[in-house]
């Protein structure tokens, strides 16, 4: 379907969920089945790419081995260009588009260029990956707050730094995205901020899909264990008493689906 005469198509910023294709929302499924163009990056379940109609124009804008990711500006330009030619454009993102997914930047860019844009929330990895390890990210006996935080700040200098010592004092639980690279530093800072070394901690690698592994440790030995056991990205780190409240038997079996490991 082409964009209506004189008009522009709509770009849907769609959350693909964390990996298990069954965690896709009904709305996302409907849009994938009817889209004219699909723009996706690396952390998107492969099975979902098969849902689009034959003839759908596909663009990959993620990282490839040995290459940088497609710059955000190019992705923005691709989306505007597609909106000039098509009616329904799905911009598919891992997890939820507005949680560490640059969905906010893309929405603002499209809106500023007069392109109709709608967000379709998805199941975020920070909740689903712990759940598939039986870890609830909040628990009444483990405090009242949880913080979703990126550990990627050292690499992504465009972002203000995280006050890890402050978080140690003010958040009962932490769910850390992209935290592996910087994990030793993060754990040291949290301990320096007052968190006990004995605080329960966990890492879930490739949550919800084939290849899921989880490791339960303490804050003091987490970084060492992650290195020794060769945990790799994508992974979610959970720190706090919630980890002690895990119920392994409630964890769903990870889907027999592939989650590409980002390069
Ligand atoms: C750029 S962020 C995108 C987060 C995404 N928007 C979301 O809501 O889940 C990518 C990071 O999410 C986490 N992540 C995504 N999928 C994951 C999975 N299936 N298992 C564990 N961590 C995952 C990892 O920390 C990864 O480095």
Image: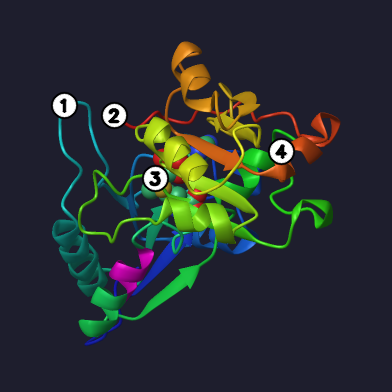
- Specify whether tag 3 is near ligand 1 (CB below 8 Å): yes
Residue 93 image position (x, y, % from top left): 41, 53
Density class for disc 4 (Cα within 10 Å; few <14, some 14-19, many ≥20) is: many
**Residue appearing at x 77%, y 34% in the figure:** 251
Position of the C terminus by quadrant: top left
Q: CA distance from mark 1 to mark 2?
A: 8 Å
Q: Main secondary structure of the magenta part?
A: helix
Residues tagged 4 and 3 counted as in contact (Cβ below 8 A): no
Q: CA distance from mark 3 to mark 2?
A: 17 Å
Residue 118 image position (x, y, % from top left): 43, 75
Q: CA distance from mark 3 to mark 1?
A: 22 Å
**Residue appearing at x 14%, y 58% in the figure:** 74
- Specify whether tag 2 is near ligand 1 (CB below 8 Å): no
Residue that mark 1 sits on: 66
Q: Which mark is residue 263?
A: 2
Residues tagged 1 and 2 counted as in contact (Cβ below 8 A): yes
Viewer-nearest of discs 3 and 2:
3
Q: Which residues are magenta?
A: 103-107
For marks 4 and 2, the one nearer the N-term is 4
């Amino acid at each position: 379907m082409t964009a209506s005469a004189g008009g522009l198509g709509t770009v849907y910023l769609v959350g693909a969920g964390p990996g298990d294709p069954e965690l896709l929302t009904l709305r996302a499924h409907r849009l994938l089945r009817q889209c004219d163009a699909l723009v996706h990056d690396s952390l998107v379940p492969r099975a979902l790419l098969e849902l689009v109609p034959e003839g759908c124009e596909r663009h990959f804008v993620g990282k490839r081995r040995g290459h940088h990711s497609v710059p955000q500006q190019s992705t923005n330009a691709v989306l505007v260009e597609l909106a000039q030619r098509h009616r329904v454009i799905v911009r598919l993102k891992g997890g939820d588009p507005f949680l560490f997914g640059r969905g906010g930047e893309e929405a603002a860019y499209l809106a500023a260029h007069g392109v109709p844009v709608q967000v379709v929330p998805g199941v975020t990895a920070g909740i689903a990956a712990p759940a598939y390890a039986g870890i609830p990210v909040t628990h009444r006996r483990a405090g009242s707050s949880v913080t979703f935080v990126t550990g990627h700040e050292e690499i992504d200098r465009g972002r203000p730094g995280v006050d890890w010592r402050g978080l140690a004092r003010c958040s009962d639980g932490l769910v850390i995205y992209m935290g592996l690279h910087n994990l030793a530093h993060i754990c040291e800072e949290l301990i320096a901020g007052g968190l006990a070394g004995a605080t329960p901690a966990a890492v879930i690698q490739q949550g919800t899909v084939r290849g899921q592994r989880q490791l339960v440790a303490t804050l003091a030995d987490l970084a060492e264990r992650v290195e020794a056991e060769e945990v790799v990205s994508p992974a979610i780190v959970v720190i706090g008493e919630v980890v002690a409240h895990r119920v392994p038997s409630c964890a769903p079996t990870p889907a027999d689906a592939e989650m590409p490991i980002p390069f």
